[in-house]
């Protein structure tokens, strides 16, 4: 397969990804990266996140939780982050494998009990479970799609973050 075809398959610049992977093989220390976001409260349950040079990402709670429903709430954003991360993984790995994606959709849902969040009980305030359904439309063989799925689910940074205990330090400054 020529580089021009690989670059344009699934609208992914796989050459950029391969170049980064090659550089990391030569200089392993550059693989350790740090990502940042800042959040400012805007009143009520509204806040906005700033990430790199992008416009604000708004957050709010639904009316039933006392918000004004002007944006997705944080737990919805967690689901979206996982779905977006998986989409990147499918696009990159399908392209690297020469698989054309005609369509990709990812449906996510999580079960969350509000007792702890509302101060009515102690325990887990987060998701008890998250389920994901991935639909891929491609002419690739079922075996190829299943191998792609295994590769993506085994390498998703957000998936790995959510599926294991991550040290969390929240300092009041």
Image (tube, helix red, strand yellow):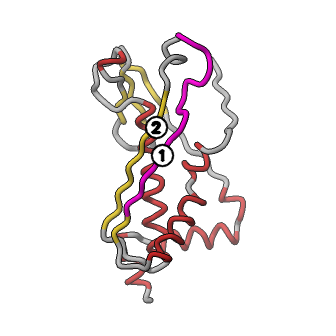
Answer with mark 2 or mark 1, whichever residue precedes in sequence. 2
Near mark 2 (Cα within 10 A), the count class, few <14, some 14-19 or many ≥20, is some
Q: Secondary structure at mark 1?
A: strand
- Mark 1 burial class by Cα count in 10 Å: few <14, some 14-19, many 20+: few
Q: Is residue 95 above or below residue 34?
A: below
Question: Which of the labelled discs sits on residue 150, or is there none?
Answer: none
Residue visible at 36% across and 21% down in the picture: 46
Whether residue 88 is visible here, answered yes or no, is yes
Would residue 166 appear left or right of 91 to someone viewing this image? right
* Magenta-colored stretch includes residue 70: no
Residue 128 located within the stretch drawn in magenta: yes
Rendering coords of residue 153 (x, y %):
55, 58
Q: Is residue 36 left or right of residue 72?
A: right
Q: Is residue 126 left or right of residue 167?
A: left
Q: Is residue 74 above or below residue 173?
A: below
Cα gap from disc 2 to disc 1, whole angstroms = 6 Å
Disc 1: which residue: 131
Q: Give coordinates of residue 91: x percent, y percent.
A: 43, 66
Residue 142 occupies quadrant: bottom left
Tag 2 secondary structure: strand
Q: Position of residue 84 (x, y in %)?
A: 42, 51
Q: What is the quadrant of the N terminus in the image?
A: bottom left
Compared to 152, does 64 lie above or below? above
Residue named by callout 2: 110
Please state the extent of the stretch shown in magenta in the rendering.
120-135
Residue 122's image quarter? top right
Number of dots carrying numbers: 2
Mark 1 and mark 2 in contact (Cβ < 8 Å)? yes
Most foreground residue, 115 or 165: 115
Can residue 8 be spotted in the picture?
Answer: no
């Amino acid at each position: 397969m020529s580089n021009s075809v690989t670059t344009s398959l699934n609208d992914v610049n796989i050459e950029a990804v391969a170049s980064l992977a090659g550089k990391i093989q030569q200089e392993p220390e550059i693989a350790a990266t740090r990502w940042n976001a800042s959040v400012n409260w805007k009143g009520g349950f509204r806040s906005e996140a700033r990430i790199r040079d992008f416009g604000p990402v708004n957050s709010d709670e639904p009316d039933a939780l006392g918000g004004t429903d002007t944006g997705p709430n944080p737990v919805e954003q967690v689901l979206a982050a996982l779905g977006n991360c998986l989409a990147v993984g499918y696009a990159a790995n399908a392209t690297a494998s020469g698989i054309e994606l005609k369509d990709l959709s990812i449906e996510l849902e999580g079960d969350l009990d509000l007792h702890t969040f509302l101060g009515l009980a102690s325990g887990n305030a987060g998701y008890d479970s998250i389920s994901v359904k991935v639909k891929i439309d491609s002419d690739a063989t079922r075996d190829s799609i299943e191998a792609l799925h295994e590769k993506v689910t085994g390498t998703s940074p957000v998936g790995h973050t959510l599926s294991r205990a991550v040290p969390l330090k929240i300092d009041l400054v």
